[in-house]
Image: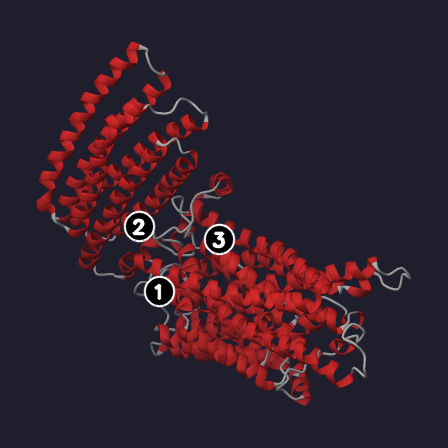
Amino acid sequence: METIYLFIVGFLFLLAIFDLTVGVANDAVNFVNSAVGSRAAKFKVILMVASLGVLAGAIMSNGMMDIARHGIFHPSYFSFFELMCIFLAVMCTDVILLDVFNTLGLPTSTTVSLVFELLGGTIVLAAIKLLGDSAGIYDFGMLVNTSKALQVILAIFLSVAIAFVVGTTVQYLARMIFSFNYVKKLKYTIGIFGGIACTAMVYFILIKGVGKSSLVSPEMMQWIDVNTWPIVGASFVLFTVLMQLLHAVGVNVFKIIILLGTFALALAFAGNDLVNFIGVPLAGYSSYLDYVANNNGQSVYDFMMHSLNSSAKTPFIFLFAAGLVMVWTLWTSKKAHNVINTEVNLGRQDAGDERFGSSLIGRLIVRRASSINDFLKQRIPANVRKWIDTRFNKDEIILENGAAFDLVRASVNLVVSGLLIVIGTNMQLPLSTTYVTFIVAMGSSLADRAWGRESAVYRITGVLSVIGGWFVTAFVAFTVCAIVTLIMFYLNVPAMLAFIVLAVVLLIRSNLKYKKKISEEKKATIYQEILNTKDKDEVWTLLRKYYAELQAKNIAETGKEYKEMLDAFFNNNLKELRKAQKEIVNHRNAFDLDRHRQLVGVRKLKAETAIEYNTWFHLGVNSDKQMIYCLRRMADPCKNHVDNNFNPMPKEYIDEFRPLYENICKSFEEASSIVETGAYDRMDELQKQVRAYKKELSTMRKAQFERLHDNNGSMKVDLIYLNIMQESQEMLSCLKHSLRANFKFQH
């Protein structure tokens, strides 16, 4: 029996390694986002600084391990078997959640998942114990550490509001002090700002962070407690003078603050989140050692886990090894290098790729915020408003090459996020680093007026989507872990082994899906190059290539959807019609995103180039959009016709129209090939064929009108047939315009 549980403990550590790699890959954005987004240093330099922070944080994170040992449950009232059920269920649920959320594309939080998984597993076993307790020995408070659990949950969710308010307020004050042209405002302010920022970070890193570490002797900890404020005062004076001197000799103090902040945030991340990855396996390992050494013949069902009441004494080698795994992942994981897009784009100062669509709640919030803003404008004196506006003059903004926002905002993001997280860590509250850093970044971008009227609804929708994903994580983690724990408790070791096999299968499946996702994301490489380059000639070269690529894709997809939709309608296949209808809607949404991206590129062109080619750009884009509208105007009536069980299309109509619509599909394939390859010498012949097909459609429409007036057939069928021919004719006209516009745009 002991051998089986040793195998389970070993599997917990394997899952811990997996969780470490996935956790760093998912959460790397939390501590490198600001440095990368502001281009404060080269990417490798940022990774080196972050790596040092991660390693230091991992080594000093020992105190947080108590959350997994006795933060949610009272271990004295649970047997070794019961806790092993909870621990294995937590780790297997993590794998299941990762697979499901990756498949659905929803954001997750490792902190939220850990807390609610432990809570779900604990509560279900507590319920079983209470139901079987005829003697009334137990009560709920004895089994579940309700006060600590509530404290942890409140800390997680309150951190959202606190982070947003603090991030918004501090960034607004920083912008009022420095303005967007911060270089002019540094002479008398940078020393104090740098002194406050560096002192705050050093205070929480060295005094609160190192002071809680098992590496520091009790005597040193006592000395730190006694001399805290003298150390803080001396640090402020030292850093203020140092920052002012560095500025005087030409050093960019903001970059120093950002790199120090990156180190601090990486340290806070590792110190706070390491428990999410290895806390449960270490608790399982400690439980196993205690059972083997002290069971005295007791079974796994009778041996109670009093030993977990003590604080964790994690061996240094485990902490150091975990830190090395995290650092290795940070340097080698492609996902870790690509994951920064969401936060950088949502907090970006200028126009770019809006990754989220519009939502009803987002629109309502923007509308109400606009009303409040108009109300405040009427109440604030004009001269005060004018002065405030001078501090937010975006024409004066200073961005490093390809930066999404400036160094001032990056500094605020890092300092505020680092302080909030380290405060939570040292209170042994596992604040979600994802929550805090994301919301601080959103608050600072809002204060910076980065959310204009044209982008606010998309960014608010994005924030709401991410926050909604966190709440879904909490509910799913609690429910799934409770179910898994219940199954393991009643089915014993066979169920444990079955879930281990399931976890392995899902790990392999998730890895394969991620590789596929990465290959698809590489298709947007040209757009990223357009965003990053400042060379307007290079923008023009890249934009023409990008435009041709997207136009060819759009024309090809239009032809494919046209054929699929008509085939489904002619075959009276409702399932395929619904599928075609959904594909058209997805195509429209993807097209809107592509159009926005192309417009971003056009705005980066030289003025004379943009003016010269503006007409052809918009003609091509609008023609493609009209083709999608034509598809929608065909698909909806066709789907409703079949859904209502109206008379199917007569065979004579199908036989009459099939040769023509097959030729139309071939025209779309040829047009896509011409645009993709640039072989416009074939365009005249294709245009000639398209005109012939349009003429043939006109003749067929006239004949169909005559049939309609004869009243011999089904009027609904006749009308929908007319609609198909009319929209097909309109699609061909749009195809002609699109081809001509593409040719002019490329030459």
Measure the C-alpha gap from mark 2 to mark 1: 34 Å
Q: Nearer the viewer, residue 609 or 44?
A: 44
Q: Circle 1 sits on which residue?
A: 184
Q: Position of residue 398 (x, y in %)?
A: 33, 62
Alpha carbons under labels 3 and 1: distance apart: 47 Å
Label whose residue precedes the other's in the sequence (2 or 1)? 1
Q: Are marks 3 and 1 in contact (CB under 8 Å)?
A: no
Q: Is residue 435 visible?
A: no
N-term mark: 3 or 1 = 3
Scheme of colours in the image? secondary structure
Q: Which residue is mark 2?
A: 597
Q: Nearer the viewer, residue 382 or 243?
A: 243
Circles 2 and 1: CB atoms closer than 8 Å: no
The residue that mark 3 highlights is 104
x, y percentage for residue 562? 30, 37
The crowd level at tag 2 (other Cα within 10 Å; few <14, some 14-19, many 20+) is: many
